[in-house]
Every structure is written in structure tokens, then in C-alpha cells.
Amino acid sequence: MELGDLRIVADENRIVFLDDFRIGLRLQNRLQQIEGPINLSQDSPPAAIERPLAPRGMMRGEWGLAFSVERLSVSERLIGFLNTRSKYARLGLETMGSSWLIAPGFGYNDPTSVVFEVIAHNDLTGFSSHISYAYTMFFELDHPVRLDGRSYGGRFPH
């Protein structure tokens, strides 16, 4: 689906609009979890295991990387902000373990899934790839940003 300077690719072109300004983001049914110990001075990614998010869910204190069903292609004129939907944050789900920014040019040449750093503050089950646990809002910049050719999709398989 093309929305001006934004392209969204989703299953069956099903885009979730929570309201006039928020686009819902759903989680794929997979979770990558890093296996330790981890050496922060190494450039190579640490070993990770991948498992289904449902039906087991996540235990309190568990964290991992989750990926949006939607794949985004953002122009150099847009910047996006991400947030966990408050109704799920109040229950103990946090999807923004670090960055909450979608940079101009994200997925520009190849639509890319958003990677979420998911943290469970309670035992959580019942995950579904049909529910938007997070959302994004986009803002138009006064001046386009010069893109440096960075591939945001190359760090993790989507």
C-alpha cells in the first residue's frame, strides 16, 4: 500500500489503522533470543535461537527480538516514532527495549520489518499475529535527509 512517501507491505495488504494518525504494527510468530555470554566488544552478532512466540509466550523477565508483520519502505522525507500500545504495556508487555525511531530511508530499497526488543514484565501468553501490540506515527520533514545507502534489513532476517 502506497501512502505518499511511505510504502507498507503486509499479509493480504491488511494494514491496521488504529485511528487517523497511528498505524498498528503486529508481531510475527517468532522470537529470537540471544544466547550468552556476550562480548560487547565483538562486531559479530552473538548466537541466537529462534522459537515461536505463541503458544508458549514469554515468562517474566524474558526478552528477545520480535519482528513486525508489516514491512516498511520510508522515503527520505519521513521520520517515524514507535510506541507500545498502552493497553498492552499496562499488562507488562514492552516492545521498545531500545530504539523508538524509524529513520528516514528505512527500508527504502527493500521493504523491511521493524525489529522490536520485547521485554515481558509479567508472564505473558496469548500472542497473536493479528493483534497490533505496537504502533508507529510518521512525520514529514521540512527537508529530505541525504540517504547513505545503509541497509536496515541486513542485520536480522525478516
Image (cartoon, grey):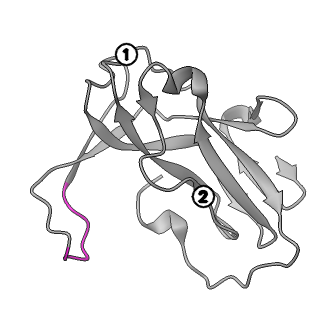
Secondary-structure class at tag 2: strand
- Which residue lies most toward the left here? 37
Position of 90 compared to 81: left or right? left
- Which amino acid lies under the numbered mark 1 shown in the image of this protein? Thr
- Which amino acid lies under the numbered mark 2 shown in the image of this protein? Leu
Query: Residue at 77% across / 68% down in the picture?
Result: 75
Out of 113 and 77, give the one closest to the viewer. Answer: 77
Any mark on residue 125, and which?
1
Instruction: Give the prevailing secondary structure in the magenta stretch.
Output: loop
Position of 28 compared to 22: left or right? left
> What x and y, as percent, mark residue 129?
54, 26
Q: Residues within 10 Å of mark 2 (few under 14, many from 20)?
A: some
- Residue holding disc 2: 101
Position of 143 compared to 157: left or right? right
- Residue 19 in the image: above or below residue 66: above
Q: CA distance from mark 2 to mark 1?
A: 27 Å
The segment highlighted magenta reads: 41-47
- Residue 122 in the image: above or below residue 116: above
Out of 12 and 154, give the one closest to the viewer. Answer: 154
Query: Residue at 36% across / 19% down in the picture?
Result: 124
Any mark on residue 21, and which?
none
Out of 110 and 32, give the one closest to the viewer. Answer: 32
